[in-house]
Amino acid sequence: MHTLADLAQSLNRSAVYLRGLQTRFALPVPQGGSYSDAYAAFLRTVVRVRILGVSESALVRLWELEKKLLTLLNVDSTGSATWFLDACGQTSHRARRLLLSNYDLGVALPSRMLQPSLNFRATLPELFAGNEMGEDALRVLESYLETLVTIHREVNNELPQLRATVRRARALFGATASGERSIRSKR
């Protein structure tokens, strides 16, 4: 478990910035101030993707689509307030996982093989099914994939600049691959 101060230090961001992320991504704040490893992994993903030049508004849109898709697929079966974060930090089957929630859909994305009618919840269903109200998991998945393609394009466009920046930082400041500076050794 992590405190907000621990997360701020490990992500090199202020606690105020992290609170802002919690607000903008509508994340629950755990009582007692103890954050799970999965919660920390989510914040780490958001911070790292932002470093790659992806706008926060694009990430919030992607996050809303992921939550909507997971809700339509009835994934919220654990009763946990952070059920949409609980897969964060998992590393297996990367091609089958959503970007932010890291939920494993069981099929490689993009795919049309989802089974939107499966219900993993033990609770009573809504009066009307989501697709009867105009919501359709495949339509949400399509919106998700469109947004994800845009984010991938932004990241791919930014990677050459990021690599050049890292090389320049190493040349100027003697930074090592692990991020440590070797300035002390030059004294």
Image: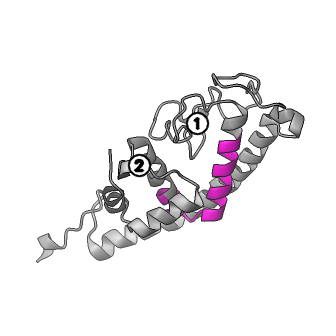
Q: Nearer the viewer, residue 99 or 29?
A: 29
Q: Residues within 10 Å of mark 1 (few under 14, many from 20)?
A: many
What secondary structure is marked by label 1? loop
Q: Which amino acid does label 1 sit on?
A: Arg
- Nearer to us in this view, 180 or 85: 85
Q: Where is residue 137 in the image (x, y as percent from the top left)?
A: 77, 35
Left or right: 65 with respect to 28?
right
Task: Answer with mark 1 or mark 2, whichever residue precedes in sequence.
Answer: 2
Crowding at dot 2, Cα within 10 Å, few <14 / some 14-19 / many 20+, comes out as few
**Rendered image quadrant of residue 169:** bottom left
Relative horizontal placement of residue 63, taking residue 132 as reference (left or right): left
Measured as percent of width and height from the top left, residue 103 is found at 57, 35
- Side of 158 relative to 163 (left or right): right
Whether residue 51 is situated above or below residue 75 in the rendered picture: below
The residue that appears at 52% across and 41% down in the rendered structure is 81
Q: Is residue 43 visible?
A: yes
Front residue (pair 3, 179) = 3
Quadrant containing the N terminus is: top left
Residue in the picture at 36% in, 57% down: 4
Alpha carbon of mark 1 to alpha carbon of mark 2: how far?
28 Å
Of labels 1 and 2, the one closer to you: 2
Residue 153 visible at all:
no
What's the magenta region?
A: 47-68
Mark 2, residue position: 31
Is residue 57 covered in magenta?
yes
Q: Is residue 98 magenta?
A: no
- For mark 1, what is the residue? 97
Quadrant that contains the C terminus: bottom left
Query: Residue 43: horizontal and vertical position, in percent?
Result: 46, 53
